Image (spheres, helix red, strand yellow):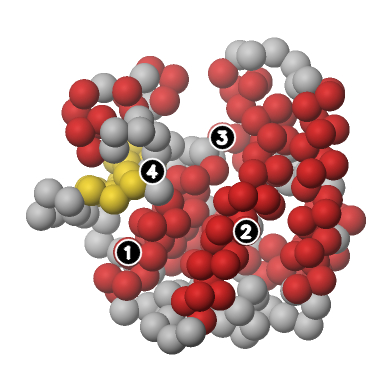
Amino acid sequence: MKLYYAETLNPRKACAVAKYLNSPVEFAYVQLTKGEHKQPGYLALNPNGKVPTLAISDGLSIWEADAIMAYLARFAGSDLLPEDDRQIEIMRWLSWNAQHFTRAASGLYFQYCIKPWIGLGEPDEAAVQDSINQWRPFAAVLNNHLSGKKYLLGDQLSIADFSVAVTLPYAKNARIPLSEFPNVARWHERMNELPAWRDPFPIPDALAA
């Protein structure tokens, strides 16, 4: 298997799960600034022209980071993707995250991390404030849910934790007001105890530096 990635949000969670599970993947870096994700060879694997993509040895390719995490967990027989009704809970958190929590935080990530990286100038203060206003209510939902819990499913780590937490390594640089939500901050500190979460990429993550 070959995991195509760049040092950005969605590849981070796929790479972290691959490292956590010691998955038998070859990491392939895609240089976004050189447009490698828009080349015909890559588009044949992922017609969206996005990262990450997991190329499977039998010719199958999987795109979308949450699906890649699920595949890697199932391939490993890992309880990161349990086979009982907890899968429904995981699906709920993955959907909630994509539509709300990370969607709001990614606006801050774009303004403070991506724009300087690709030379688009200073953050747009109106866009920043809009993202913060959107993020805080969902952070409160997560903060309440995590009260008395180690992880989203209770005591069990799952792919939902890797997905929902993906913007938090960038909280300082992206000015995400994480300190306002102590249960979320504590949960992310626990995630940071995992070497695969702290250092998911084969090369350093310049955007989190």
Asked which quadrant contains residue 160, the reply is bottom right
| CB atoms of marks 1 and 4 within 8 Å | no
| CB atoms of marks 2 and 1 within 8 Å | no
Q: Earlier in the sequence, mark 1 or mark 4?
A: 4
Can you tell which of label 3 and label 1 is closer to the viewer?
A: 1
- The residues tagged by marks 2 and 4 sit, at their Cα atoms, a distance apart of 20 Å
Residue 52, numbered circle: 4
Can you tell which of label 2 and label 3 is closer to the viewer?
A: 2
Q: Identify the residue under disc 2.
A: 96
Residue at horizontal 70 percent and vertical 43 percent from the top: 105
Residue 196, can we see it?
yes
Q: Hey, what amino acid is under mark 4?
A: Pro
Residue sitting nearer the eye, 162 or 103: 103
Residue 103: image location, x then y, percent: 64, 44
Residue 25: image location, x then y, percent: 26, 56
Q: Earlier in the sequence, mark 4 or mark 3?
A: 4
- The residues tagged by marks 3 and 1 sit, at their Cα atoms, a distance apart of 27 Å
